[in-house]
Amino acid sequence: MKIAMVGSGYVGLVSGACLADFGHEVVCIDKDPGKIERLNAGIMPIYEPGLAELVAGNVKAGRLSFTTSLAEGIDGASAIFIAVGTPSRRGDGHADLSFVYAVAEEIGQNLKGPAVIVTKSTVPVGTGDAVERILGEANLPFRFAVVSNPEFLREGAAIGDFKRPDRIVVGAEDEFGQQVMQDVYRPLFLNQAPLIFTSRRSSELIKYAANAFLATKITFINEIADLCEKVGGNVQDVARGIGLDNRIGSKFLHAGPGYGGSCFPKDTLALLKTAEDYDSPLRIVEAVAKVNESRKRAMGRKVIDALGGLDAARGKKVALLGLTFKPNTDDMRDAPAIAIAQALIDAGVTVSAYDPEGMDMAAPLMPGVEMATNVYAAIEGADAMALVTEWDAFRALDLDRIRTIARAAVLVDLRNVYRPDEVRAKGFTYTSIGRT
Ligand code: UDX
């Protein structure tokens, strides 16, 4: 079947390439000519493991192509996915739907035959209804359906997540929509992925509820970590001890510097706005968003404490190891490193930094931070280093070498990558999260 993917960003590109890999004919559309030109030349707009190879293989096989023309791209497609961005609207935190609506209008103007229009972008409850109204205004002389099909892809693991999902959620209001989506995802049934059909509104809500729940889980363990530090507990033991209870589950219980990224911060805020609009407060999610926001800067203070407090910190140098919001991505959106660096700079600390993939994205977001060419160059002459993102490359640092090049052997491990006794045995002053 032919599938059109409108929006060749992170979600559109990964989904389009994976659907092509399953044998569908996929056209990825984007209005940015530079992006399409680069994609045609095999250059990816984002860093995602395995994506360049997947795209190249499917382009070569003739199943995947790129265009700037929506009219051309959707011609003959049975399913048209909308995978454009829904950023937080400046000022009020609502999801900005202008891109989604503009695409819906353009589809209405150019559609030539029956098709299912699928919202893949994360959109607030009721957006599917609005898209259906917009298409309705085009008075199309054939049938169409609007369905919701949220994505649950994790950056850095997106291809695996797409191909072996825990579940596929489809919010469809009629049989036509359900049937076409069955055909789209048929290749995945071999992997026994459950395909769940719900109403469109439920499907839209599932995405937000899932992300808010995961954000809550992380924030919960982060606060338990703080308590562990006060009472002398070990948060990793606590997480294991509670996670083995199947009702709780062991995932997303890694304490750290607070969640970042393109989804959790933006989606929790958008969900809170929906809750406000419908006068149905989500007090737990409100607390989660607030606690997480203040945690990022608090991590800066943790580093200052390791330097001996505010007075002692002034004029000292700290090396930040890892800047992206998590490893295996170059994404800096809402990364805790930004707030941590700012807190340090505000305290008169000089900050150097190194990240394996995120330097280009980080530099404009972190003015005043000295970007080093490698991890040891960042550490040179530092009075402390803070491990902010748990890249594999930081898991086996040469601690003996660091002791000779740093001014002081102080490690603040915000991801609990190292074993306290081992690092201390090497002569380091070591602090981590929720462990004493
Ligand atoms: C997330 C969801 O997992 C995905 O389903 C959704 O579609 C988009 O948002 P992503 O933003 O790529 O994916 O990252 P994820 O791996 O979920 O991590 C989010 C943040 O939480 C990161 O900053 C990460 O470091 C942090 N995190 C995650 C923790 O601090 N502890 C954990 O146990 C897990």
Image: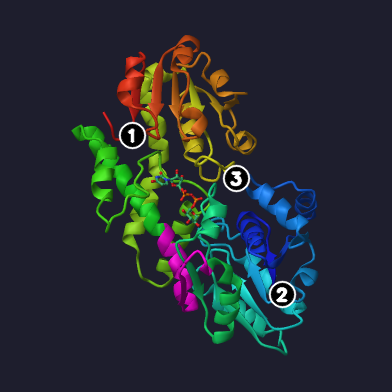
Which is more N-terminal, label 1 or label 3?
3
- Residue 50 picture location, percent across and down: 62, 47
Q: Which residue is mark 3?
A: 49
Q: State whether label 2 is within 8 Å of ligand 1.
A: no
Q: Nearer the viewer, mark 1 or mark 2?
A: 2
- The relative height of residue 269 versus residue 194 in the rendered view (above or below) is above
Q: How many marks?
A: 3
Dividing the image into 4 quarters, which one contains the C terminus? top left
Q: Which residue is mark 2?
A: 77
**Distance between mark 1 and mark 2 Cα atoms:** 51 Å
- Residue 347 picture location, percent across and down: 44, 25
Residue stretch rendered in magenta on the structure: 189-211
Give, as a three-letter code, the residue at label 1: Ile
Residue at image position (25%, 39%) is: 237
**Distance between mark 2 and mark 3 Cα atoms:** 28 Å
Q: Are marks 2 and 3 in contact (CB under 8 Å)?
A: no
Magenta run includes residue 210: yes
Q: Which residue is mark 1?
A: 433
Secondary structure under the numbered disc 3 in the rendered image: loop
Q: State whether label 1 is within 8 Å of ligand 1.
A: no
- The relative height of residue 35 versus residue 193 in the rendered view (above or below) is above
Q: Is residue 401 visible?
A: yes
In front of the other: 100 or 290 = 100
